[in-house]
Image (spheres, coloured by chain):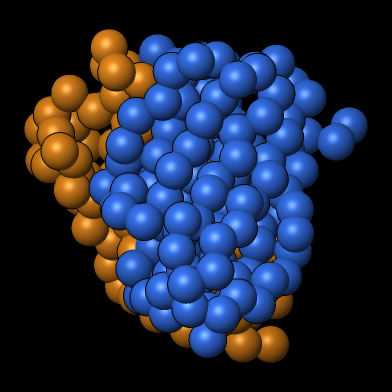
Amino acid sequence: NAGVTQTPKFQVLKTGQSMTLQCAQDMNHEYMSWYRQDPGMGLRLIHYSVGAGITDQGEVPNGYNVSRSTTEDFPLRLLSAAPSQTSVYFCASSLNPSGGTEAFFGQGTRLTVV
Amino acid sequence: GENVEQHPSTLSVQEGDSAVIKCTYSDSASNYFPWYKQELGKRPQLIIDIRSNVGEKKDQRIAVTLNKTAKHFSLHITETQPEDSAVYFCAASRARIAGNQFYFGTGTSLTVIP
């Protein structure tokens, strides 16, 4: 069972570069989301999606774009990387977009912007 | 939006002792409260959850209690073992039209001293 798969695991970017973090799940989950994890700040929601073609902003969306063309995939795009985007990024999915179900996390992407 | 506060931020206990982590939430409509364990360099994984129609739930050495009136919930780990050392996150969520958002606490780093 693959679950939620994120790529890459590590990435170093120069300021101003763009990149896409990939996330795929094989559990047929409707709900997918992206979080960033910074020391002492827990997990903060960047963007989320309740189904293919539907996305919405979370708590810290600035500097990031998402799209959801299929149920399985939910890529996160950094448009112009900044040092403040240095963080660990987690993708998560859960079965029921209406609430109350476990979130399954990917293994994380450690991003450093220099 | 929801605000989840978690205390303490760090906790050290002797092996065999109990550990308690507390969280408060602000949105009285929140109805699902999961707890996640994150080992160093790993992804968060669900260890136990509770819904608003239940006051307490137990799974072997782990238990969670919920006080809806006071809007707080707690994680109890008894007979702690070194492998319990990790960061623990509480979260709150509710069913909503725009999608099920998880609001996470800032985490508790638990160290179990052998």
Image location (x, y in percent) of residue B56: 39, 33
Residue B34 left/right relative to B111? left
In front: B3, or B13?
Answer: B3
Image quadrant occupied by the C terminus of chain B = bottom right
Image location (x, y in percent) of residue B15: 63, 79
Q: Which chain is blue?
A: A
Image location (x, y in percent) of residue A52: 55, 15
Residue B99 left/right relative to B38? left
Image location (x, y in percent) of residue B50: 42, 30
In front: B15, or A48?
Answer: A48
Image quadrant occupied by the N terminus of chain B = top left
Q: Is residue B63 visible?
A: no
Q: Farthest right residue?
A: A1
Q: Which chain is orange?
A: B
Q: Residue at x 75, y 53 (%)?
A: A7
**How many discs mark residues in the rendered view?**
0
Q: Is residue A78 visible?
A: yes
Q: Residue at x 48, y 84 (%)?
A: B12
Task: Give above or below for A98 relative to A89.
Answer: above
